[in-house]
Image: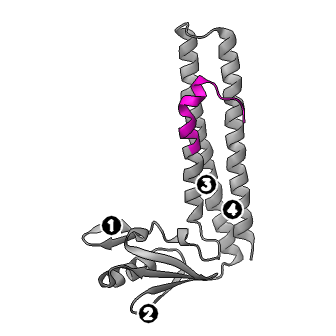
Amino acid sequence: MAETNQFISKYKTEFDGVIEHLKKELGSLRTGRAQSALVDNLQVEAYGTRQALKQIAGISIQDSKTISIEPWDKGILKEVEKALSASNLGLSVINLGGKILAKVSMMTEETRKELLKVLGRMLETGKINIRQIRDKVKEEILKAEKDKDITQDDRYQYLADLDNYVTEFNKKVEAIGEEKETEIMTV
């Protein structure tokens, strides 16, 4: 990673935040294997408000194709079942009375190709977010030069550092994407 300068340092947490957000988003993509991230943030209508499933239930992986969801309050079991059924996640929902089993169905080749398109859009959004942060940093560098806080030589060096830094983050996004693509295409 390029050595960070004062301008990049100010935005380092934003750059890191893009990567963390992307990882979280990609965790919710269905890959044919049971993962708690698939349903963690599913919104359930309970207690008069919408809440993330992970806040109202215990979620565990029973086997490679089954997610076990056990609401802490059995009175909201029907609401959880309803949210899972309406989720478009391709899950088969089985209500066992005290808990719910969500079976992950096998993905078809067509489904995998559709997921790759979604993956591509998510990765592009990540790169766009990185570019937006880069533009903010670049504006600050140019403003600092205009205000005579830095020299023209400093500006060139800071911009070169910024380009290297952004390139490294774009490589991270691509690596994360390749890893997820492999996961999606693995039968």
Q: Secondary structure at mark 3?
A: helix
Residue at image position (71%, 67%) is 183
Could you tell me which residue is drawn at 35 percent across and 67 percent down? 51
For marks 4 and 2, give the one nearer the viewer.
2
To which residue does mark 3 refer? 121
Residue lying farthest bottom?
96
Mark 1 is surrounded, within 10 Å at the Cα level, by few (under 14), some (14 to 19) or many (20 or more) other residues, namely: few
User: Of the residues tagged 2 and 3, which is closer to the observer?
Assistant: 2
Secondary structure under badge 2? Answer: loop
Would you name the residue on which mark 4 appears?
Answer: 180
Q: Amino acid at mark 1?
A: Arg
Q: Nearer the viewer, residue 179 or 121?
A: 179
Q: Secondary structure at mark 4?
A: helix
Give the alpha-carbon distance from disc 1 to disc 3, as whole Å.
27 Å
List the residue tagged with mark 2.
Answer: 96
Q: CA distance from mark 1 to mark 4?
A: 29 Å
